[in-house]
Structure formats: C-alpha cells, structure tokens
Image: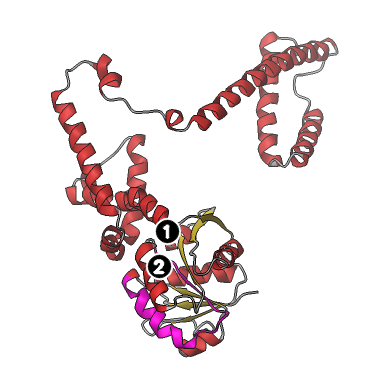
C-alpha cells in the first residue's frame, strides 16, 4: 500500500488526511504552522519525504512553487508529487518548472471540501489532469483517489480550468454578489426555487473567505466567464424593462431551453423511459385484473383482503429477484409494497372481499 505524505495541514489537508485514514491509507504530514496529531507528524520535510511514496502539496495556489522548491532536494526518483488546486494551469506550470522531467508530478483537483467529507456526501469525485512529461503519473494518482473511494475524472488542464471558470468561479461570484446585496438576512421565508441557491451560498460561505480571490484571479478563464455572465444579465434586464405585459408571450420572449434540447442523448433516453413506463402501466392493468380475480376468489371462500403470509413470501422472492439483477433489494421491495397496496385498494373498492 502506498504511503501518503501531506505538505500542508490546513482545513483541507487535515480533512483529506482524515479521509485517507478512514480508507486505511497511511498518512504523515508536515506543516510548521499547524497542529498535527503526533502519530502523523513528520519531524521535517526530509523526514516526510523519506517516509512517503506519494506527496500531496496541500498549500494555497500561490505557495505551490515554493513548496515544490523546498521539497525537491529530498525527492527520490520514485516519488510522485500531486497538487490539489482548483486551478491547473498556473500550478502545472510551476511544477513543470521546478520538478520538470526529473521527478514525477501531476495536477489533481478533489471536487469536494472539508464540509463535504464531514457531512458524508457521496460519491466524492476528483479530477486528474495528465501531463506529457509524466504520462504514467495519471494512473497512479487515479489509483490513490479510488483507494479513497472517490470517482475519478480524467481531463486536460485547460478544459478543467474553463469548466471551473463557468461553474465554480461563477458560483462564488454570484454568491458574493447575493451576500453583498445585504438582503438575505431579511428573508423570513423563500420558495423552493430559491432553496438550491441558498444551499450554494451557504456552501460558498464555508470557504469563500480565503479562496475567493484565488478562484477568481488564478483561473485565466474566470474574467471571461464573469464578463459574459454580466452581459447576459444586463441583456435580460433590458428585455424585461421593455417587454409588454403579456404573459402569453413569456415563453416566446424569454425562451429557456429544456435540458433535453441541449443533450439529444438525454431526450432519447427519456423517450425510452417513457416507452418502458407505458409498458409498466399496461402490466399494472393486467395485474389489476388478476388482483380483482384473486379478491373475488377470496371473498367466495370467506377470506379477507389481507394475506400477511403471502405478502411476506412475495416480498422475499422479489428481493431475491432484485439481488440477482444487481438492484437494491429493499428499494425493489418498497416498490412491490406499493403495488400490493394498490391491489388491496382495488379489491376493497370492488367489495369482492370483506375488509
């Protein structure tokens, strides 16, 4: 099993070390500015490197080059150095300059923070960005994250940064604007449509203090994303100001493309699901006929609608069938409990059996 060394033990470094510990991965850490549990604390950078196979630079983006420079004299040829920054371009350039082709390095981005780990959010995901200098490093880094029970996404650095600019950076930008409005604390209630936004704002508040400037300024695509968002919002604002008060024109004047229109494969999948649902309803109709027949037979023999023994046996068999198909047995059992309740209601409504 690989031994993990953490250079930096701030909030994220400590949280990642905890996650690794839960997965049974041996962790050591070094950070002269942080309190580290004695059993995990390395005495020095050289001690950290000597006792580790993979080294994670869990430091702010602007400290990555300096951290790699300090670490370089203690690196072995078999060491792999990872950074965990939310931006890849700058840190990747720094590691290429400091470590170059001599020491394997890789850029990664865990798509979770300390709160995600503490709240038990799953699945956790991490992006690994391969580099040409060390092609084998990507699989080694991916193996580490899989060992930590994370889903791994492989993406080139530029695509990663653009994706983050139009998601992560914009989320922080909008949340900061909403907070600066000064109105959120005055909200005594809000509709479901705003609940997701409040969740985003609260999530950003957990990290925004020390990450906001870095996220907005370190990503070379972030300024472009902010500008395009502002232009789009200004355009919508002007359209709203000049639009006639005719609700019938709302969809025509302010079209909001459905997700399926932007993802044809999703539309195809939904159509297939609709077809299957039609078949399921047809099967329920056939089952209803049989349920009514069973109810009539039970009534003819003086039996009530409920047959607990039969229901338990039926659910046990359905659980076995579900397990054989790779489905959650309890989830399938809940579906059939609803189906049996539907059948009992039919029998009672028909009056084919005493209640």
- Whether the residues at callouts 1 and 2 have beta carbons within 8 Å, the answer is yes
**Does the stretch in magenta take in 146?**
no
Could you say which disc has been placed on residue 157 in the image?
1
Q: Is residue 312 above or below residue 284?
A: below
Residue at mark 1 to residue at mark 2: CA–CA distance: 8 Å
Question: Going by the image, does 197 lie left or right of 140?
Answer: left
For the N terminus, the image quarter is bottom right
Q: Percent from the top left, x then y, of residue 60?
A: 35, 71
Identify residue for label 2: 92
Question: Going by the image, does 254 lie left or right of 7?
Answer: left
Is residue 174 at all visible to an observer of this figure?
no
Start-end of magenta stretch? 62-85
Could you say which disc has been placed on residue 320 in the image?
none
Q: Percent from the top left, x then y, of residue 147?
A: 61, 64
**Which of the two discs, 1 and 2, labels the residue nearer the N terminus?**
2
Q: Residue at x 55, y 79 (%)?
A: 79
310 and 236: which is toward the camera: 236
Q: Residue at x 33, y 43 (%)?
A: 197
**Does the stretch in magenta take in 77?**
yes
Q: Residue at x 36, y 35 (%)?
A: 192
SS of the residue under disc 2: helix
For the C terminus, the image quarter is top right
């Amino acid at each position: 099993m690989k031994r993990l060394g953490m250079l930096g033990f701030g909030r994220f470094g400590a949280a990642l070390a905890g996650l690794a510990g839960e997965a049974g991965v041996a962790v050591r850490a070094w950070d002269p500015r942080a309190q580290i549990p004695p059993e995990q604390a390395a005495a020095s950078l050289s001690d950290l490197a000597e006792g580790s196979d993979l080294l994670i630079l869990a430091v702010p983006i602007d400290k990555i080059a300096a951290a790699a420079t300090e670490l370089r004299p203690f690196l072995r040829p078999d060491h792999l150095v990872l950074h965990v920054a939310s931006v890849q371009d700058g840190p990747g350039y720094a590691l290429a300059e400091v470590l170059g082709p001599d020491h394997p390095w890789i850029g990664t981005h865990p798509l979770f923070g300390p709160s995600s780990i503490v709240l038990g959010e799953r699945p956790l995901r991490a992006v690994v960005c391969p580099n040409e200098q060390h092609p084998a490093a990507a699989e080694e880094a991916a193996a580490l994250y899989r060992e930590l029970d994370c889903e791994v996404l492989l993406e080139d650095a530029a695509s990663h940064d653009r994706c983050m600019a139009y998601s992560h950076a914009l989320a922080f930008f909008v949340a900061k604007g909403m907070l600066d409005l000064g109105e959120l604390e005055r909200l005594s209630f809000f509709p479901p449509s705003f609940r997701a936004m409040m969740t985003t704002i609260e999530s950003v508040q957990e990290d925004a203090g020390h990450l906001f400037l870095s996220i907005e300024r370190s990503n070379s695509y972030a300024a472009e994303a902010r500008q395009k968002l502002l232009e789009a919002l200004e355009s919508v604002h002007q359209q709203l100001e000049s639009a006639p008060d005719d609700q019938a024109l709302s969809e025509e004047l302010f079209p909001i493309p459905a997700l399926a229109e932007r993802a044809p494969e999703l539309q195809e999948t939904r159509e297939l699901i609709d077809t299957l649902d039609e078949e399921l309803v047809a099967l329920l109709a056939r089952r209803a006929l049989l349920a009514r027949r069973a109810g009539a037979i039970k009534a003819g023999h003086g039996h009530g609608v409920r047959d607990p023994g039969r229901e338990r046996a039926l659910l046990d068999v359905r659980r076995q069938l579900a397990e054989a198909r790779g489905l959650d047995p309890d989830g399938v059992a809940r579906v059939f409990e609803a189906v049996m309740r539907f059948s009992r209601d039919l029998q009672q409504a028909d009056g084919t059996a005493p209640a």
